[in-house]
Image: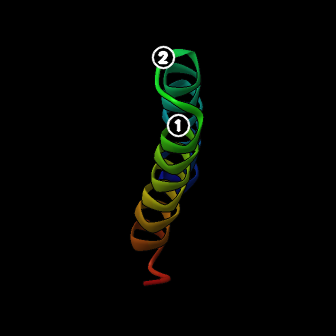
Amino acid sequence: MSILIIIVVALVLLGLALYAVQRSPIPSPVNWLLQLVLIVIAIWFIGTRAGFF
């Protein structure tokens, strides 16, 4: 049950971070790269907490 809560919190924080990056005045290619990095970090975080990595 606690892993489910961690996953939900991580996904909510990821959504807020992606929204903030999308709204910031950063050029489009850099914006795309930042979003990609955030998604990879979230996948890595969830994977390590779940014991996949």
Color theme of the render: rainbow
- The answer to whether residue 33 is above or below residue 19 is below
Residue, disc 2: 24
Residue, disc 1: 31
- Label 2 neighbour load within 10 Å: few <14, some 14-19, many 20+: few
Report the amino acid beneath label 2.
Answer: Ser
Percent x, y of residue 37 = 46, 54
Residue at disc 1, secondary structure: helix
Seen from the viewer's position, the closer of residues 35 and 39 is 35
The alpha-carbon separation of the residues under discs 1 and 2 comes to: 8 Å
Quadrant of the rendered image containing residue 44: bottom left
Report the amino acid beneath label 1.
Answer: Asn
Task: Locate the C terminus and report the quarter of the image it occupies.
Answer: bottom left
- Label 1 neighbour load within 10 Å: few <14, some 14-19, many 20+: some
Quadrant of the rendered image containing residue 35: top right
Q: Residue at x 46, y 44 (%)?
A: 34
Q: Residue at x 58, y 44 (%)?
A: 32
- The answer to whether residue 23 is above or below residue 32 is above
Residue at disc 2, secondary structure: loop
Seen from the viewer's position, the closer of residues 34 and 9 is 34
Chain-order first, disc 1 or disc 2? 2
Q: Is the C-beta separation of discs 1 and 2 under 8 Å?
A: yes
